[in-house]
Image (cartoon, rainbow, N blue to C red):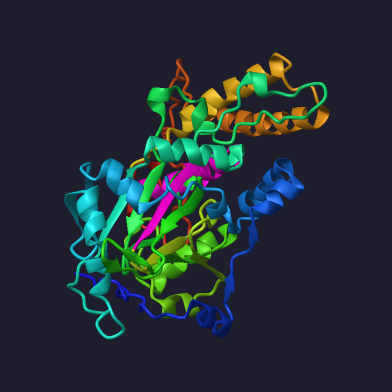
Amino acid sequence: MPNQRPKAAFEPLPPDLDVSALVRSTPSFEWAPKFHCNAIDAKGVESFEKLVQLHVVLGGMPLVVGGFNERLDNSLFSEKWLRGEYATKSETARNLTTKTNLPLTIGHYLKNLPLLTNQWNAYNYKEPNRQRIYLKDIDCPQQWHDHLKSVLPPFLFYLNKPDASEACSTQEEVIPRVGDLMSCLPSNMHAENLMCYIGHEGTYTPAHQEMCASLGQNIMIEASDGSTEHGKVTKPGSSIWFMTESKDRHVVSEYWMSTLGHDIDVEDHFAQINAWKGAPFKTYVVEQKPGDFILVPPMAAHQVWNRGTRTMKIAWNRTTADTLKLALDEALPHARMVCRDEQYKNKAIVFYALGHYSSLLAEGHATHTRATQKLQEDFAKLFYLYTGILLSESFQNDTPDEKETEGEISDGQEIPGTNMPGATEEASVGGHI
């Protein structure tokens, strides 16, 4: 049997890692761009939407908006509230050490977070058999969903789809573009991807790209702050992100396979710091704290490491006309190569979104020039994708008659190819070369 390619080993991050010093000392590392959410109020949501489109979607670079913790209801987004309301709710946690699922209740998990965190120190953090229990991909409480929706810019939120009544008026331009094209699907076709993630020191998410080239949104809603909770002292919680740009996706994939021995599409490897340091591409670093809202570009690889006693995050994905093209052209073929399930019905999204935009334009909801132009741009992108889908899946009912391709060779006629250098006797059989 051929030798398998050597695979880079998992190496955890030390609990006392100085992230600032790491970024300062590594030429290929830099902080992801970040600004306070108050700037959105000052510049306007429309300007912010344009920034996201140019910087994140088209530019393919991550963006961080901080300060949302000042606008969230701290009594609602808290460990105390979650334990009080959902302590008995059963969930399935992920044991990252054994790579198995672990059924437990939310209350049991929250109660044992200090124990899971305090097992780690600067001397034993590399021990392979200690528990890393991550409560990930759990349903978001409806109360959190509703409050978060009222705080964040609407176009960024999960399943955003403005009603026709929100279209442009004669005095004020309101762009009725859909923030998440999955919302155009019938409700029974939606992929539920608004999820919560609760972790402790040493839990992580391996390097990966967002599913189907979608846009990632992740906000840390709460974390331990070092105070005493339920009679136990906590450690400040945060999450360290290592992120790439969309334009480097091919280099990242090749580096992961050829140097690290892993497939980025499989999502099973958390890369070592030294691997990121030696990578032939730029790495953006984020130390996410409560209130930090991270926008992840399509097909940009990233991995996350949780620190402290507790981190609590809400994440979701959005699909736009631009991400659909990436999905159909690149992401889906890669996912099929490794047999990953296509959870987003991308072709159906194209069809239903095209119908929605067609109705908006036909019924004259968009009366302002700029709004109409943006709707038409999205419509044109969707129509191009729809045409490609139809052509790729079309066939002809009446197939043409078969043509005779092997003609008879008369006596004395030279067989094509027999006078070529190196031609053999077998080449003349049946008239084939």
Identify the residue at horizontal 60%, vertical 22% (top origin).
163
Residue 401's place in the image compared with 247, above or below, is above
Residue 90's place in the image compared with 295, above or below, is above
Let me know if residue 327 is in the magenta part. Answer: yes
Q: Nearer the viewer, residue 425 or 188?
A: 188
Q: Which of 255 and 122 is in front in this view?
A: 122
Left or right relative to 431: residue 29:
right
Identify the residue at horizontal 76%, vertical 27% (top origin).
372
Q: Nearer the viewer, residue 94 or 9?
A: 94
Rendered location of residue 373, percent (x, y) = 77, 31
The image quadrant where one finds the N terminus is: bottom left
Rendered location of residue 57, percent (x, y) = 62, 49
Residue 300's place in the image compared with 45, above or below, is below
Q: Which of 359 and 45 is in front in this view?
A: 45
Q: Can residue 335 be seen in this view?
A: yes
Identify the residue at horizontal 72%, vertical 41% (top origin).
46
Left or right relative to 32: residue 188:
left
Let me know if residue 108 is in the magenta part. Answer: no
Rendered location of residue 244, percent (x, y) = 53, 64
- Tell me the magenta residue range: 310-338
